[in-house]
Amino acid sequence: MKTDIPIKVLLSSKMKSVLFNSGWLLLDKCARLFLGIFVGAWVAKFLGPGEYGKLAFTISVMAFFQVVCYLGLDAITVRDISKKTKESYAIIGTVLGLRLIVGGGIFVLMMLYVFNHEMDIERKLIFAFVSISLIFQSFDTFDLWFQSQSRSKYAVKSKLVSYFISNLSKIAFIYADCSVVFFAFSFALEYFISSMALCYSYTKFKVTGKLKFSPYMAINLLKESWPFIVSGMSIVIYMRIDQLMIADFLGEIDLGIYSALLPLSASWSFVPMILSISLAPLITKTKLDSEDEYRRYLFYIYKAFFFLGVIVSISIFIFGSFFVEILYGKEYIPGVVALKLHSISNIFLFMGVAQSMWIVNERRSKLSLLKTFTGAIVCIVSNAILIPAFGIKGAAISAILAQATSAVLSNILFAPEAFRMQFFSIVRMRYVRS
């Protein structure tokens, strides 16, 4: 059966708008990848593992509160604005209000805790600068409005301006031989400039209505969003808990080494994400046309994503030592083995992203929550056992176990059919109709 998307559809104004919008999102990801690795490595090399570990620890702590402050409302907000255009100002105003209340509240509580406990002034300032970003990030709500209008270029421009300025400030601080506190300030600076730029872009983009906060709408939004908050917390746990446990078991020097090198492995997740966004319309259409064709497409997508993950892992195994020494310096060489081990987790991550297309088309959204929750449990238990025994190499092994469990092994219990599809896509060369 023919499954190609008609040329008329590809050339339609809506499709052009979607592709143009995706291009801006890709630009944002690539710019952040490039600057994040190279400027981040420069900062890590300048500060050294110990000082960099202080900053990494604070950012890891804030990551947990960051998820709470977003309230799991991103997808819901975009959906509701698209469906209820006349209520868009109430939706944006309500979501913005909720996030400001939660972000501001957590910031105040954090400051009360920090300044009433014994720690040096440098650490207190690092916590203050990093945690104030919880308030500024509330204005990312305007980004959701641009997404709903397929006008992400305005949000991307705003964020890229803030990201470039933040990275330029880091370079300036390096040349000025500044302390780690200034690099924490640059973290807050990025979010502040981004919030101001998003506000400006929103007001200039033909917006005629006034924002308003609806308590009734706020209650309904929170009733629907709580599972996404739980899911987001589970994801943050198995993405960040290793760094907190490294700091607890091994100290900030080991944390600095591990967290500095992690982007060389973890940053490649944008590759399967962008591919899945591009392939999603074709997969959805194919399922409507033919169930067998739909399964055949999934088989080859699983296989392609698996081999892409293998290629990323092998590349890091081959070139990891070279890039660590060139970008980070000899102080970070002890982390090379952990980096190479962590790269293996990309294989399972890529397969997990491929499965997300199956989850969406089979309407199995609750499965995502079960998988991430299971992965989080495995991550906590394995880190508690392996970090004391093997150091940061143990954290890297835990990352493999957590990703393998979340993306593949959990399917044995929760989605046997999906596990069979994943398994046969690896061991078979060609699709066999079941």
Image (spheres, helix red, strand yellow):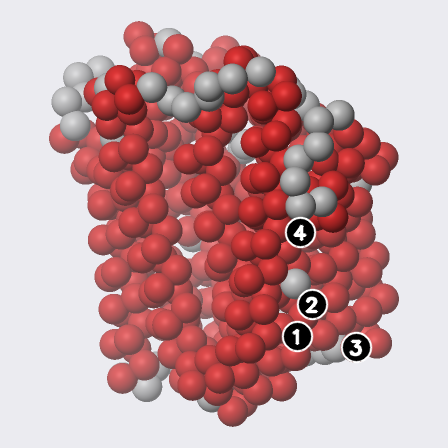
Q: To which residue does mark 3 refer?
A: 390
Q: Earlier in the sequence, mark 4 or mark 2?
A: 4
At numbered mark 3, what does the secondary structure look like: helix, strand or loop?
Answer: helix
Label 3 crowd bin: few (<14), some (14–19), many (20+), radius 10 Å: some
Viewer-closest of 120 and 270: 270
Label 4 crowd bin: few (<14), some (14–19), many (20+), radius 10 Å: many
Where does residue 362 sit, x and y in percent of width and height?
A: 64, 21
Please report the residue visible at 76 percent of the width from the left and 37 percent of the height from the top.
419
Say if mark 1 contacts mark 2, CB within 8 Å: yes
Determine the CA span between mark 3 and mark 1. 10 Å
Q: Earlier in the sequence, mark 1 or mark 4?
A: 1
Please report the residue visible at 38 percent of the width from the left and 22 percent of the height from the top.
5
Mark on residue 348?
4
Say if mark 1 contacts mark 4, CB within 8 Å: no
Label 1 crowd bin: few (<14), some (14–19), many (20+), radius 10 Å: many
Left or right of residue 369: residue 316: left
Q: To which residue does mark 2 refer?
A: 396
Determine the CA span between mark 1 and mark 2. 6 Å
Q: Closer to us: mark 3 or mark 4?
A: 4
Mark 2: amino acid: Ala
- Regarding residue 290, the answer to whether it shows in the image is yes
Please report the residue visible at 49 percent of the width from the left and 38 percent of the height from the top.
276
Where does residue 22 sit, x and y in percent of width and height?
A: 32, 37
Name above or below for residue 61 compared with residue 335.
above
Left or right of residue 370: residue 230: left
Q: To which residue does mark 1 refer?
A: 338
